Image (cartoon, grey):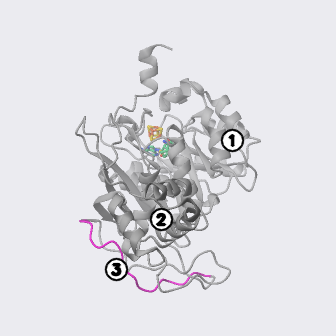
Amino acid sequence: MSLAESFAIEKTPLERYVAPEKPSLVGLTRMQLADALGELGVPEAQRKMRVQQLWHWIYFRGTISFAAMSSVSKELRAALAERFTLDRPEVVAEQISVDGTRKWLLRLPGDPDSGLPHDVECVYIPDTDRGTLCVSSQVGCTLNCSFCHTGTQRLVRNLTAGEIVGQVMMARDRLGDWPSPFVPPLKGEGRPPSVAEAGGVGSDSMTTPPGSPRSSRGSPPSPSGGGMRKITNIVMMGMGEPLYNLDAVRDALLIVADGEGIGISKRRITLSTSGVVPEIERAGREIGCMLAVSLHAVRDELRNELVPLNRKYQIAELLEACRNYPGVSNARRITFEYVMLKGVNDSIADAKALVRLLKGIPAKINLIPFNPWPGSKYECSDWEQIEKFSQVVFDAGYASPVRTPRGRDILAACGQLKSATEKLSARERMALRAMAMTD
Ligand code: SAH
Ligand code: SF4
């Protein structure tokens, strides 16, 4: 492969992460926390117990100050505060939509060499029985999928594990989704009831400066009578290709799934990849979360164009990796994402080829209406075509491949009200993707 060809497939992540002088403990694994305690002179014999305490305060309670860690000795609290913070990524803008969807723009430490800001987005989509958080893994993306806005960004760097876990913690701060300090865990339950925010969502789309991070009022009861958590599902479907940053994504997701901390089950965590074949097996083995694959085309020729990484790892190879994904079964299906592009990949013949191609793989199919962005060269398929396509998929035994009624509002805008759709920001684009994962 020539240099020019490989550049068409991927860019080099040139931006650097430069750690702040006073680093945050957010995102540290148990082992790393033990090392941090070692640096402060905590004797080895005590470290395990201290790590348990810190873990509980940081990841179970969501504590934002060392002073609140009442079970930790005063001296250690002071020493910790001297050397470390509990900072999450900085929220520079928050948008709340009528349907409760929230988007946060986060500013991460930039690279002093380039002087450019490192911004990522994180989106929360509430639904009746769940709340999904769409998390980013990179600033920008090294890949260049031709229908994806993130792919056009030149600025790329990997997020650290702390910046990934930090998105979840920031969102729980903003949503008032940490357990109340006053309510002990219920016996037999992994977590105590969560705390709902005071204000609710529901006003028109607006941008607010970040205000106080959380409040503490009663939470709505869940059907089972316990408390209802706001964030129940995580999808790695924000900016970036998670399998190009697998070590940090792994550390972050294992922290998010840890039952003594944030405790979101691995079955409710989905990692979406454009098809980085050599890393798929490792992701399954080392993380064990659900997998989604951005397929988008049934022929290599077309997929080469839509997802240039396909020139490196072709469809047959990708599907073979899916068949061998650790833990895959009918109860743990792989989701295949398929963006609906008018006149490009949305014919009935494509739909038939799609179900033929996936035969024998425990699969779900999510049809994602294309969300146009200024300068994009595609259009979203007409609604009728999406319905016809989805009928073929449905007849082949895949249940409700297109979105829920709420998704439909936005879908209706797609293609029919193009100018209005173009005004839909990255929030809607990400909300759509994340909704595609929440049935
Ligand atoms: N890089 C990973 C995860 C982030 S993108 C991946 O590609 O899978 C999450 C999903 O959104 C992918 O399926 C991606 O193909 C899709 N997507 C990107 N841009 C889109 C757009 N404009 N409209 C609809 N879906 C889009
Ligand atoms: Fe990157 Fe995914 Fe966008 Fe492709 S679709 S450019 S892999 S974020």
Q: Which residues are magenta?
A: 208-223
Q: Residues within 10 Å of mark 3 (few under 14, many from 20)?
A: few
The residue that mark 1 highlights is 355
Looking at the picture, how far across and down is residue 91, in whole percent? 30, 60
Residue shown at 47% from the left, 50% from the top: 161
**Three-letter amino acid code at the position of disc 2:** Arg
Near-viewer residue (157 or 72): 72
Q: Residue 188 in the image: x percent, y percent?
A: 68, 80
At mark 3, the secondary structure is: loop
Query: Left or right: 386 with respect to 63?
Result: right
Q: Nearer the viewer, residue 112 or 287?
A: 112
Q: Is residue 36 left or right of residue 328?
A: left
Q: Is residue 342 above or below residue 119?
A: above
Residue 317 on the magenta span: no
Q: Secondary structure at mark 1?
A: helix
Q: Would the CB of label 3 be found within 8 Å of ligand 1?
A: no
Q: Identify the amino acid type marked 3.
A: Gly
Say which of marks 3 and 2 sits in front.
Answer: 3
- Tag 2, which secondary structure? helix
Whether disc 1's CB lies below 8 Å from ligand 1 is answered no
| Residue 199: image tag | 3
Q: What residue did someone put label 2 on?
A: 406
First in sequence: mark 1 vs mark 3? 3
Q: Is residue 436 visible?
A: no
Amino acid type assigned to the residue bearing label 1 in the image:
Val
* Label 1–label 2 contact, CB within 8 A: no
Which corner quadrant of the image does residue 189 belong to?
bottom right
Q: In the rendered picture of this protein, how many numbered marks are placed on residues? A: 3
Question: Do tag 1 and tag 3 residues touch (Cβ < 8 Å)?
Answer: no
